[in-house]
Structure formats: C-alpha cells, structure tokens
Amino acid sequence: MSRDEAVRFVEHARSVGQSVVFTNGVFDVLHPGHVRYLRDARALGDVLIVGVNSDRSARALGKAPDRPINPEPERAELLEALASVDAVVIFDEDTPHAIITALQPDILVKGADWDAGAIVGRDVVEARGGRVVRIALAPGYSTTAIVERIRR
C-alpha cells in the first residue's frame, strides 16, 4: 500500500482499539528466518505493518551490487501473502525514519542483531509512549548465505 493508505490503515486500527506493530527490512530472498521473525513480531500486537526498502534504498545499504535480487513489488507481494503480515508499505528513503514518523507505531521491532541505540525510529516510538522490541533471529538463516550458496 502507499504511505497514505498505510496511515489510514493505522488510523482505522487505532479507532477500533488495535495496537500497531512495525518492522522493516529488505526481505530479498524470503526464508524461514524471516517467517519466524515476522510471526514473532506480529505476536506483539494486533496488526503488523512491514516497511520494505525500495530497490534503490536497498542498494544504498551497501550490500552486493546486484542486490536486491527480487524487485520491490515481488518482495512486497510475498510478504503480503504471509498470515502474520497485515500490511506492507515500500519506502524509498535510506532509513525508515520518515515512514515510522508517518505511521507512529505502538511497537517497533528489529532483530536482536541491531544495537538498541542504533534502531532507527526509536526516538519517534518512545516519544509517544511506545516501545522498541529486539527479537532473536533464527540461527542458520541469512539471505546473504543463501545467495552465496547459490553462486557456488
């Protein structure tokens, strides 16, 4: 959905008393680690919105020059198909700060591999009384490792 649609989605969720969880990432090659992470994030609230880096912003993260492998509409479509995901919004900025500011989620989720102080949007969420949750990642799953294995 567009940013405006996502804002309306959040407004509706709040109007019926639902809590909003937000997470973000590239989600290039979907694997069980992603599915488990998103399931755990969704369990923290009533609705889960996933921010997906656009192709341009994913490349700006400095991953391999040929990443992302899957284009943004396909990555969003796969995420939308998951039972744990209620909405997907693609963002083009280098960080998700603007989309987090627009959505004002109650809970912001990132992987435990992120240092708590480095989580973008923490300031926005905590300023309105929300919380930031770091979720342990499923060991043995990595898009980078999958891509390297395919290339070999």
Image (cartoon, rainbow, N blue to C red):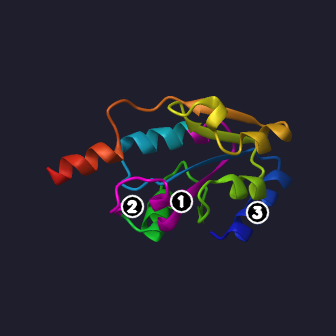
| Left or right: 121 as drawn, with respect to 38 | right
- The disc, 2 or 1, on the residue closer to the chain's N-terminal end is 1
| Left or right: 19 as drawn, with respect to 95 | right
Indicate whether residue 57 is drawn in magenta. yes
Q: Quadrant of the N terminus?
A: bottom right
Say if mark 2 contacts mark 1, CB within 8 Å: yes
Q: Position of residue 127 (x, y in %)?
A: 84, 39
Instruction: Give whichever of 79, 130 is nearer the camera.
Output: 130
Q: CA distance from mark 3 to mark 2?
A: 26 Å
- The disc, 3 or 2, on the residue closer to the chain's N-terminal end is 3
Which residue is pictured at 61% across the width and 54% down the height? 95
Crowding near the residue tagged with mark 1, few <14, some 14–19, many ≥20 C-alpha atoms within 10 Å? many
Label of residue 53 in the image: 1
Q: Position of residue 42 (x, y in %)?
A: 60, 42
Q: Secondary structure at mark 1?
A: strand
The residue at which mark 2 appears reads as: 68
Q: Position of residue 69 (x, y in %)?
A: 34, 62
Q: CA distance from mark 1 to mark 3?
A: 17 Å
What segment is highlighted magenta in the picture?
Answer: 41-69
The residue at which mark 3 appears reads as: 7
